[in-house]
Image (cartoon, grey):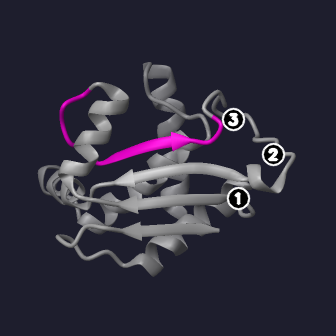
Amino acid sequence: MIFIKNSQKQIPINLKQVRKWGQIIMAELGYEDFDLNIWFCGARTIAQYNEQFRNKKEATDVLSFPFYPDLKAGERIQAIEPENKQLGDLIIAPIIIKRDAASHQVDPQERLKLIIVHGILHLIGYDHITDADYKIMHRQEVKLLKLL
């Protein structure tokens, strides 16, 4: 199940569409019976979390908090108990997505899709710290974006 909270009012968000994208992504990845939490918030709020958890004093577009933080890309989550069927939490700042979409000259909806895909991939162990990791994660992003 996908739980969504929208505490920001600056940017309209189609929550039904976001839920549908999340369901498609999770089904493709084989986690359709897992839970995902998404919180849309403002720039100040995400900046506070970014500083607290990443020591970066700036707003960002998405923060991912995996339920299984030691999972490596490509590993399957083995949840034994139903209450452990969690992917994790995404915190997303739509105002930052809108700004980044403008700077990349892309549609904000397309940028939001990418950010949701990107965030979910982080929840299941993908990262982009090295160039090799980036290539692996990017291939998954392209594959999933085609489904949306």
Q: Is residue 124 magenta?
A: no
Crowdedness of circle 1 by 10 Å Cα count: few (<14), some, many (20+)?
A: many
Amino acid, disc 1: Phe
Q: Left of 126 or right of it: where is 8?
A: left
Q: Which residue is mark 1?
A: 34
At numbered mark 2, what does the secondary structure look like: helix, strand or loop?
Answer: loop
Marker disc for residue 75: none
Q: Residue at x 28, y 47 (%)?
A: 46
Nearer mark to the viewer, of 2 and 3: 2
The segment highlighted magenta reads 56-68
Q: CA distance from mark 2 to mark 1?
A: 9 Å
Q: Are marks 2 and 1 in contact (CB under 8 Å)?
A: yes
At numbered mark 1, what does the secondary structure look like: helix, strand or loop?
Answer: loop
Q: Left of 92 or right of it: where is 129?
A: right
Q: Position of residue 101 (x, y in %)?
A: 20, 56
Q: Residue at x 19, y 52 (%)?
A: 43
Q: Left of 43 or right of it: where is 17?
A: right
Q: Position of residue 49 (x, y in %)?
A: 32, 40
Q: Is residue 59 magenta?
A: yes
Q: Earlier in the sequence, mark 1 or mark 3?
A: 1
Secondary structure character of the magenta stretch overall: loop
Q: Position of residue 109 (x, y in %)?
A: 31, 68
Q: Left of 4 or right of it: where is 140?
A: right
Q: How many marks?
A: 3
Q: Position of residue 14 (x, y in %)?
A: 36, 79
Amino acid, disc 2: Ala
Nearer mark to the viewer, of 1 and 3: 1
Q: Which residue is mark 2?
A: 79
At numbered mark 3, what does the secondary structure look like: helix, strand or loop?
Answer: loop
Above-or-below relation of 79 to 11: above
Q: Which residue is mark 3?
A: 74
Q: Residue at x 69, y 63 (%)?
A: 27
